[in-house]
Image: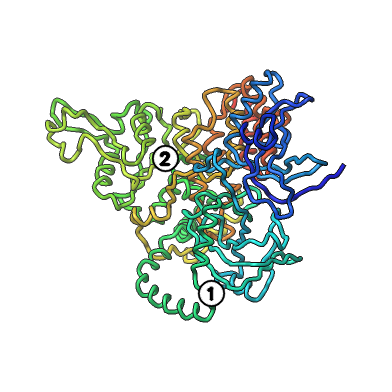
Amino acid sequence: MLEKNWEIDMVGILATDEYVEQQKGYGRPVYINGQGQLQYLIKLIADPPQNFPKVNLFTGYISNITQYGFEEQLNLDEDTRELNFRNKINDYFFIFNVVQKGNYYNIDNVKLKKKIDAFDSNKDNLFISVPFFKKQEEEDKIDDFLDKIIKKKYLGKIENISTDKDDTPQYIIWGKDEFSDLYAVGIFDNQKYAYGGFQFQYKELKYIKITREMLEYSFVNPDNKQILFIENNTYSSILNELKAKEQYNPELQSDKQNKEKITNDISNLNRCEDENIFTDENLIDKFLSITKKNKFFYDKDDIVNFHTAMKVSNLVILSGMSGIGKSKLVYFYAKSLGIANDTQFKVIPVRPSWNDDSDLLGYVDSMHMVYKPGDCGLIDVLVEASKNSNKLYIVCFDELNLASVEHYFSQFLSVLEMESDKRILKLYSEEFKDRLYNSSKYPNNIKIGDNVMFVGTLNVDESTYHFSDKVLDRANVINLKMKDDFLYYKKITQDNVDDFAEGDSISWTYEKYNKIKINDSKIDLDDNELLFLKEIHRKLNNVNKNIGIGYRILKQMDLYIKNLPKNLSKENAISRGKAMDIQLVQRVLTKVRGAEEQLEDLLDEKSENSLFFVFNKYKNISDFKESREVLEQKREELNKYGYAL
């Protein structure tokens, strides 16, 4: 039997009944075959190679997509199996290769991608596959890439795209990543492919800048981000804009850029100064320098992790053994921001006697008709912060769990989970608003702005309370690592303090701090990461219906990864895979606790019901080193005490 593999990425969707009828004259897009297996038909919606057979329907099996959680439901009747599959698969694009066996064309090497919002399955949407060349180290700007094309250099290989002359793209994309700093370059009339990859020929070379909005209806293969699938109308729009552009002339371009550079250098001097000073990179460097100068020995990952968590969390909780420097870390962070003064940085020691809101927030003294704030000073800080919205404030609750957090912190927890414009702390009833002597100083409602950051330190011993899931759901819980290199610690305590100079004091405003934050609510986690989190959620939910990964945690994990500091030195940076591991520990595994009967399977490396099984399945995302260590510790607790904390 003739067999041929087409190792070209194609795009399709589950065919409709009408389309199958139109193409074949009979049949359905989802059906149970003679062997009792579920089969389905995929409609091609991307341009195939010129020499590809005129085939528009391809056959798939459940085995093609089991890695995405699709399984045969043999316990159900055939109609239900077919309907369930349709309902689940209709949300996805199929990115696939084709295997031809005789007259049959089957899909292979399948990747699923969530459909873009604007996609309409009932219309004849068509996607064009466009090569995407990522910026190389030697390519500082677009001119460097164009110079390669002019000198007929090979630009590199791209997997799973046609290299035939007949499939020469009219333009290609070059840039930093698939949705930023992009350029369309063309217009090409021929391509060559050799050991060094692609080489393109042209009559006129042109380029235009591509915005993210222009690629709103485009997507990439999650496993091969060097091909952009661009919707046909968008593709034509970019091509028309490219055709209208003047031909690229390196000499004229150089003169133009020099003139623009002089103008921009003058007009943007102050802005550039701010951008160069108020960066993640400088803040992390200063943070590290301050800790070293003060002879504190923190893991660099903890420093970067804490900073990232502070950017995205309403509440950050620092855990770790006594004496490691949890409170000091918060102070050093305030110092690196230039706000370690009596008004903008407040440490509040929690007292064991606190048992309701009034201990923290205060109460109305109806006998003397005054509002008496809690003597910890929190309300004074919040009032001042509400009046100075461009100043940064940090409030640190020291030994947060010395009293029951759910009691004295209950109103605070409810307020902190709200959107920033709705975070209103109610001190007392409206009826007292005009009757209290000090109501002008202490209004009945205080708005808690994003310019106030909250941190808690946590000790775990017999004198403290454990957190409920309500608290854990709203916080990044960071367990500071104890570095036991005592010889190095001795060395840094003997070093001259000038070796770790703190540098000039720079005060960050809220406006400048907010510029290094990414507040985009659009989920950027890729499909593979989302499928991984879905499986983790299901494993947890099978053990206890009240725990798992809710939408709040999903959004905050995504926000954390988006806010990882860029441009850090290699030794200080946290990779995306490590960030996923860290967030799993800080946002999800904190809630894994219970008796041996409940958690035994979940923590058993040999069980398919365990979290280890999911880690192994998705090892392309991360090695999950820290998550594995946490689970192993919990497993030891089960073995020793029959209960994991």
Q: Quadrant of residue 371?
A: top left
Give the side of residue 487 with respect to residue 493, left or right: right
Which quadrant: the N terminus? top right
Question: Residue 640 at what x, y percent from top left?
Answer: 65, 26
Number of residues whose C-alpha sits closer than 10 Å to that of mark 1, classed few (under 14), some (14–19) or many (20 or more): some
CB within 8 Å, label 1 to label 2 = no
The residue type indicated by label 2 comes to: Leu
The answer to which image quadrant residue 401 occupies is: top left
**Disc 2 packing (10 Å; few <14; some 14–19; many ≥20):** many
Above or below residue 253? Residue 19 is: above
Left or right: 573 as drawn, with respect to 270:
right
Q: Position of residue 129 (x, y in %)?
A: 62, 54
Q: Residue at x 52, y 81 (%)?
A: 251
Residue 386 appears in the picture as rendered: yes
Secondary element under disc 1, as helix, strand or loop, is loop
In front of the other: 456 or 560: 560
Residue at the spot of label 2: 315
Q: Marks 1 and 2, how far apart in space?
A: 52 Å
Could you tell me the amino acid type at mark 1? Answer: Tyr
Q: Nearer the viewer, mark 1 or mark 2?
A: 1
Relative side of 360 to 540, left or right: left
Q: Is residue 617 above or below residue 390?
A: above
* Residue 66 appears in view: no
In percent of width and height, residue 151 lies at: 65, 76
| Quarter occupied by the C terminus | top right
Residue 91 vertical position relative to residue 639 in the rendered view, above or below: below
Q: Quadrant of residue 367?
A: top left
Task: Identify the residue under disc 1.
Answer: 248
Q: Earlier in the sequence, mark 1 or mark 2?
A: 1
Could you say which is closer to the camera, residue 278 or residue 222? Answer: 222
